[in-house]
Amino acid sequence: MFSNLQDKLDRAFKVLKGQGNITEINVAETMKEIRKALLDADVNYKTAKSFTDDVKQKALGENVLTSISPGQLLTKIMNDELTELMGGTVTDLDLSSNPTVILIAGLNGAGKTTFTGKLANFLKDKKGKKPLLVAGDVYRPAAIDQLEVLGGQVGVPVYTDRNSTDPIAIARAGVEEGKRNGNNVIIIDTAGRLAIDEALMNEITAVKEATQPQEILFVVDSMTGQDAVNTAKTFNDRLDFTGVVLTKLDGDTRGGAALSIKSVVNKPIKFIGTGEKMEALDVFYPDRMASRILGMGDVVSLVERAQQQFDEKQAAELQKKIRKNKFDFNDFRSQIQQIKKMGNMKDLIGMIPGAGKALKDIEIEDDAFKPIEAIIDSMTPFERENPDVIDQRRRNRIAKGSGTNIDEVNKLIKQFMDMRKVMKQMSNPAMAAKMMRNMPKMPGKPF
């Protein structure tokens, strides 16, 4: 996500590298490169020009402190301005009504129905709500089936009427059904089209009037760049939606939609989709996204994702096992499963400051854990609970059963044993302090 834009912004900042101060000439040259980078990322031309003009004006008005370089100062200004460009602050859903009606709009292929399921899951698990999904897309083949499957996955009921082809009547009946059943959030999935047409706009406007939603979320495919922004403007002119959802941000997106959409339609981005799984939905934080675009990572989001997957009771039990040197392959596999639930690996690594740039040319597959899981699954329950008993004969059997080779099995078991030893030492505060004292110091630098 945004990797091409990051590279080009890095090159733009190099114009100021080694400069003792900020001048109109070197700032103008840097802004020219930044504007080109934004346009290459499919950012709206007026947005790119206005943005670079604002950054230039602020940069020329700043004095460079002796403790920072012009490049660092410009990065700080860019971070502030990117944050403002994408909305400034996080914008929450309005869930004050009971029931709250949320209308989902967008073109076919943007990921509307998938987002509808994700949103239901988010509201149920994170907000403690009791949502109902309404299948209002009567045109796309299997749209109703898809929503029912997603509802089943997240444990949320779905209202359908397969005998009706009237989306307005279905939406109205779905709201009534939700009120009868005590659902405090009703999410209506509407029909899309391959392109904007008058019939679509009239229909969704009628659905809006019939259901009086508190939230209208417009779903756009972030990989379509400027097209997404133009589509959003047309929908907003008719619907006056309350927020935008950017999907497929885990793909090879150039970032133009995320950077342009707020300035063009003046509506906040509320959510971003970062994968196919039902948990792969994040609230949009402009400041965190700005940091990621500039290659500064997003540790806060990374910690939040980890907190969602690791519960305190399990962590306490695991800590006890580590102290007793009882951490086994079952625990190890459980930790892998929790990491996988946090999202795709490339996205997670991009949240670590500096790691995204360092590993930008390395392909990290989502199934990178598969060989490890295969090896662990080929162990007997006794072997997983007692790693010390895995001798050479057992290792040969595990290699054959997992479809790997003996070297891979030996490497995993050695790494596991080394990790277990370090974990036990680190769980003892006195031992951990001793290890820190004994670590070699970096030459020329205090430890």
Image: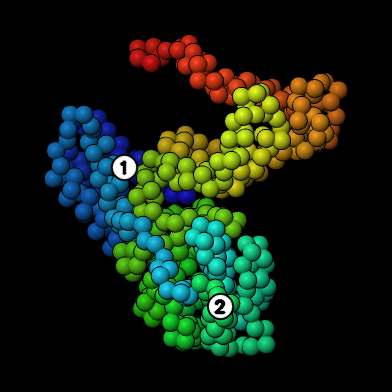
Q: Nearer the viewer, mark 1 or mark 2?
A: 2
Q: Which residue has dot 1 on it?
A: 12
Left or right side of 436 for 9: left
Q: Is residue 430 above or below residue 352?
A: above
Residue at 15% in and 42% down: 62
Residue type at the position of mark 2 = Gly
Residue type at the position of mark 1 = Ala
Mark 1–mark 2 Cα distance, whole angstroms, equals 53 Å
User: In x, y percent, where is residue 149?
Assistant: 67, 67
Q: Is disc 1 placed on a helix, strand or loop?
A: helix
Q: Crowding at label 2, few (<14), some or many (≥20) Cα neighbours within 10 Å?
A: many
User: In x, y percent, where is residue 276?
Assistant: 59, 57
Instruction: Name the quadrant containing residue 295.
Output: top left
Residue 252 seen in the current view? yes
Q: Which residue has dot 2 on it?
A: 178
Q: Nearer the viewer, residue 69 or 327?
A: 327
